Image (spheres, helix red, strand yellow):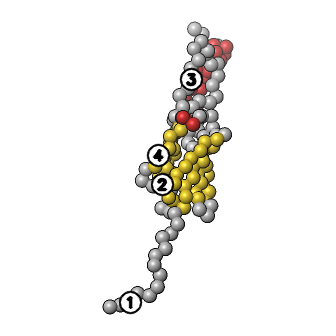
């Protein structure tokens, strides 16, 4: 095979279409989960951006004063269909979020709507002890 400009371009294009695109897309695709944290008077709210998945692809755990949010979605291959170009793919992601000591971990509730996972935790009320003078005996 002679290496003229046409053959080199053809080899380069084939490499770009198959090999390097797969490599680059897997290395540079964003797989972290962005999170906003809001504190109201009585509630902590964590809003996580997780677009393109359904509720069953998301798992939430509580572990040592951290919320652990995991997302796993399998690529669905359609028999008889060949992709000509893929600019996005699904990946597995995990986000570990510390929660404050004042959060009531018994009050955790979560909802997923329009690509945003919202996790709410109540703020524990400070325990008020008995007030007054103490008699010394």
Q: Nearer the viewer, residue 137 or 83?
A: 137
Residue 35, above or below 25: below
Q: CA distance from mark 4 to mark 2?
A: 13 Å
Residue 14, above or below 92: above
Q: Nearer the viewer, residue 10 or 23?
A: 23
Indicate which disc residue 135 carries: 1
Residue 16, above or below 72: above
Residue 83: percent from left, percent from top: 62, 19
Indicate which disc residue 61 carries: 4
Q: Earlier in the sequence, mark 3 or mark 1?
A: 3
Q: Are marks 4 and 3 in contact (CB under 8 Å)?
A: no
Q: CA distance from mark 3 to mark 2?
A: 37 Å
Q: Earlier in the sequence, mark 4 or mark 3?
A: 4
Element assignment for label 3: loop
Q: Which one is closest to the eye, mark 4 or mark 2?
A: 2
The residue at which mark 2 appears reads as 106
Q: CA distance from mark 1 to mark 4?
A: 48 Å
The residue at which mark 3 appears reads as 76
User: Which quadrant of the rendered structure holds the C terminus?
Assistant: bottom left
Q: CA distance from mark 4 to mark 3?
A: 26 Å
Q: Earlier in the sequence, mark 3 or mark 2?
A: 3
């Amino acid at each position: 095979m002679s290496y003229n400009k046409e053959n080199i371009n053809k080899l380069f294009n084939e490499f770009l279409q198959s090999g390097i695109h797969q490599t680059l897309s897997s290395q540079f695709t964003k797989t972290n989960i962005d999170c906003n944290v809001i504190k109201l008077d009585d509630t902590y709210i964590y809003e996580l951006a997780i677009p393109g998945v359904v509720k069953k692809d998301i798992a939430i755990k509580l572990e040592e004063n951290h919320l652990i949010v995991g997302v796993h979605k399998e690529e669905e291959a359609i028999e008889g269909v060949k992709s000509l170009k893929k600019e996005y793919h699904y990946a597995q992601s995990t986000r570990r979020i510390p929660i404050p000591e004042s959060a009531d971990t018994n009050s955790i509730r979560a909802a997923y709507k329009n690509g945003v996972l919202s996790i709410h935790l109540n703020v524990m009320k400070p325990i008020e002890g008995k007030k007054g003078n103490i008699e010394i005996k």
